[in-house]
Amino acid sequence: MEDSPHALLALQALDTELDQLRHRRATLAERARLREVATGLAATEAEGAEVTLQRDGLVGRQTQLEAELADIQKRSTELDGRMRSGTVTAPRDLQAMVDQIAALKRRQGDLEDSDLEVMEALEPLEARLVELQDKWAALDAERTQLGASLAAAEVAVDAELSVATASRAEAVTIVPAELLATYERLRERLGGIGVAPLVGSSCGGCHLTMSASELDRIRRQPADAVVTCEQCGRILVR
């Protein structure tokens, strides 16, 4: 059976691997792109709603104009018919009807100009709506593809996590409970690294050089003794 410090170093390697795998799973490129796509879809939908509102307002205005134009056309036709029928003979009445028809034609011209302006304003809005629909469809298709890719990538990472987790469960059984508890506390406090090798005269965790006296003290300890770095507090493995 391995001595406790070296068994702890093997456990640290597995914990580091697990941390890296969890980080990789959380930061998969597909996940980040999915967030971007979701943002793009929301922005596209918001703009589409705004443009649709503008378009619908113009369509409503166009409907009103066309209804009024139809009414003017009807009234003009009726007046013209009465004038041609011969039922109205008084010059004063005929002149009044001529004036009414002229006023209706002027109003018709104004309405037709307004209708043309509305049509011209509608054209770019309709075009923009088509662009937004195409953009949304492309983003939605990408979202579906990314979802499938992300699921596959997660399955691959989860398989590695499963193997590493099983290895850790086995490795932890040979570490004394008290030493394991100390290691876990250090890992939580020191960014995931609770134990490190002694590399020459430096700590493999904080990479600081130890004093000659401290190094001598450590080297005099029994091979299975638990020693710590005087700088960072990590458990040192010689």
Image: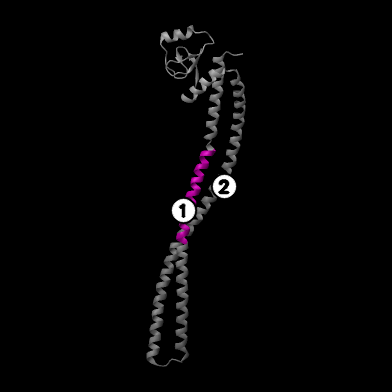
Q: Residues within 10 Å of mark 2 (few under 14, many from 20)?
A: few
Labels in figure, total: 2
Q: How is the image coloured?
A: one colour
Q: Quadrant of residue 211?
A: top left
Q: Position of residue 104 (x, y in %)?
A: 41, 79
Q: Position of residue 162 (x, y in %)?
A: 61, 29
Question: What whole-number distance in Å separates the C-alpha atoms at marks 1 and 2?
Answer: 19 Å
The residue under the point 53% across, 47% down is 139
Secondary structure of the residue carrying numbered label 1: helix
Q: Position of residue 135 (x, y in %)?
A: 51, 50
Q: Is residue 142 above or below residue 119?
A: above
Say which residue label 2 marks: 141
Task: Kindly indicate whether the residue at mark 2 contacts the one at mark 1 (C-beta within 8 angstroms).
Answer: no
Q: Position of residue 158 (x, y in %)?
A: 60, 32
Q: Is residue 160 left or right of residue 184?
A: right
Say which residue label 1 marks: 47
Looking at marks 1 and 2 on the same chain, the residue that comes earlier in the sequence is marked by 1
Three-letter code, disc 2: Ala
Secondary structure of the residue carrying numbered label 2: helix
The residue under the point 47% across, 52% down is 46
Q: Is residue 161 visible?
A: yes
Q: Nearer the viewer, mark 1 or mark 2?
A: 1
Q: Which residues are magenta?
A: 30-55
Q: Is residue 18 above or below residue 60?
A: above
Three-letter code, disc 1: Glu
Near-viewer residue (9 or 97)? 9
Q: Is residue 149 left or right of residue 126?
A: right
